[in-house]
Amino acid sequence: MFRILTLAFFLCTAISACTSVPLSTMAKLSTFDWQDFNALQAGDIQVKITVPQGFELNIERSWLGFELSSEHNHHSGRFDLQRLSTQASVIDGGLFGSDIAATTYRLQLQPESRPAFTELQAYLRQHKADNVMIRVVPKIKRYPANAEFVSVWIDLQLSSQEGFFTLVDGSQLSLSTLKVQRANATDRANEKTTQDLPSN
C-alpha cells in the first residue's frame, strides 16, 4: 500500500519538538497513492512559507524533497525553489493570542529541477514504493538578534486543481544551530583576515 509516511520540515539541522501537522492534512494524504503521484505536474507544485516579520527566508537555499521507500528500495529527489511572490500577511492569533504580522513567500520548483521530478516519477512507475516522505526545508537568511526560535507555517500545493493545504501550522524551530554556524563562519573569516594582514 502506497501512503504518505511522514511530513517533515527542517531548518538547517535543528528542529524543536513542537511540530504541528493538522489532522485534516493527515486525512487528505492518507488516500494519496502512486497513481496520484505520477499524475502530478512539476509546474503545478508550489510551496508557501510564512515567517513572522523580522525574519527573512533564504530562498536560494530552501528546497522541497520527496523520498520514496519500500522494504528493498529507496529513492529521493531534492528540488530547488524559486520565488513567485512575497507579500505581507497576518497570522490569526486565535482566541487567546495576538495576531502576528508575517511575510509569506510563494515558491515553485526551479525549471532546472523539473526534469529531476519527472525522473522520480519514472522511478516510481518501475519500482514498488510503500511510502513517500515530503520534506520542506526552509532556510533563514536574517533574524532578530535576540530571537531564539522562529515560528513557521508551510502550505503545499501538489496540483492546481486541488490548491493549497496546510502542511505545518505554526511550528517552532530553534535557531541555535544556525547561530553557531554563523558564529563559526565569522571566526574563520576574522582569522583569515588576520592572517592576510601584512606583517611589520
Image (spheres, rainbow, N blue to C red):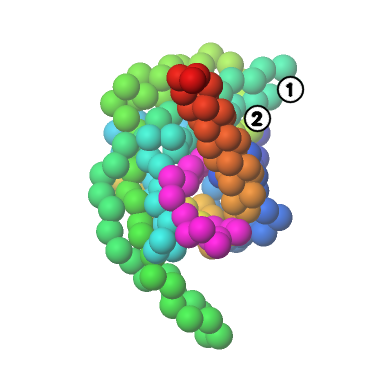
Q: Are marks 1 and 2 in contact (CB under 8 Å)?
A: yes
Can you see residue 112? yes
Q: Please name the amino acid that badge 2 sits on.
A: Asp
Q: Which mark is residue 71?
A: 1
Residue 183 vs residue 30, the one in the foreground:
183
On the image, numbered disc 2 is attached to which residue? 130
Residue at x 33% of width, y 43% of height: 107
Residue 139 in magenta stretch: yes
Residue at x 31% of width, y 37% of height: 82
Residue at x 38% of width, y 40% of height: 59
Relative image position of residue 23 (x, y in whole percent): 60, 61
Residue 157 vs residue 178, the one in the foreground:
178
Q: Which mark is residue 43?
A: none
Relative image position of residue 192 (x, y in whole percent): 52, 24
Residue 172 vs residue 48, the one in the foreground:
172
Side of 84 relative to 124 (left or right):
left
Q: Which residues are magenta?
A: 136-151
